[in-house]
């Protein structure tokens, strides 16, 4: 059990340093048709359950693949990711028609303020 934390740390660094932004997008672009169909079904499921009155939070938003599709369907959109390059790419990929709030944050240690205070 003592080896679990170092493995998580290594995976996190791997994503942030080696598989973010353009490299992450390339993985999605090069995916086989069956994987692309799964990814599209994933987005369609989210879109079918979205509403204009919602505030949506995407954990691990990457370069904005889902954010861009969800943006016209919700009131407020927030995306968090640990990779600064991915977040910078998301700013341009998602566009500027409607504000999107992006933050460099780890989903296991989110820094949002408790609204009940």
Image (cartoon, rainbow, N blue to C red):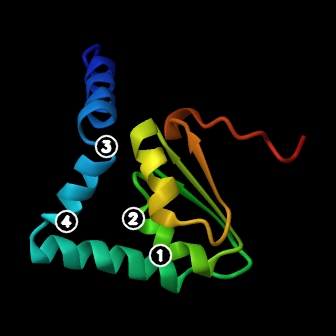
Q: Earlier in the sequence, mark 3 or mark 2?
A: 3
Instruction: Find disc 1 in the rendering and name its residue.
Output: 69
Distance of label 1 from label 2 (alpha carbons): 7 Å
Viewer-proximal residue among 114 and 79: 79
Q: Percent from the top left, x then y, of residue 64?
A: 44, 60
The answer to whether 6 appears left or right of 60 in the picture is left
Between discs 4 and 3, the one toward the N terminus: 3
Give the spatial CA distance, label 3 vs label 2. 12 Å
On the question of residue 83 being in view, the answer is: no
Pick the front one: 95 or 64? 95
Note whether residue 18 is visible.
yes
- Which element carries disc 4, helix, strand or loop? helix
| Earlier residue among tags 3 and 1 | 3
CB under 8 Å between discs 3 and 2: no
In the image: residue 77, left or right of residue 104: right
Q: Is residue 16 above or below residue 31?
A: above
- Residue sitting at x 28%, y 50%: 22
Please name the residue shown 51% across and 41% down the image.
107
Q: Which residue is mark 4?
A: 29
Q: Which residue is mark 2?
A: 65
The residues bearing labels 4 and 3 have C-alpha atoms spaced at a distance of 14 Å
């Amino acid at each position: 059990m003592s080896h679990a934390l170092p493995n998580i740390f290594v995976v996190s660094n791997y994503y942030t340093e080696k598989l973010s932004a353009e490299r992450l997008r390339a993985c999605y672009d090069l995916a086989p048709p069956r994987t692309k169909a799964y990814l599209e079904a994933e987005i369609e499921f989210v879109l079918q359950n979205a509403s204009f009155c919602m505030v949506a939070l995407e954990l691990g938003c990457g370069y904005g693949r889902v954010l861009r599709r969800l943006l016209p369907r919700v009131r407020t959109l927030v995306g968090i990711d640990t990779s600064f390059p991915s977040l910078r790419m998301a700013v341009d990929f998602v566009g500027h028609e409607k504000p999107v709030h992006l933050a460099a944050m780890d989903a296991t240690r989110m820094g949002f303020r408790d609204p009940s205070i």
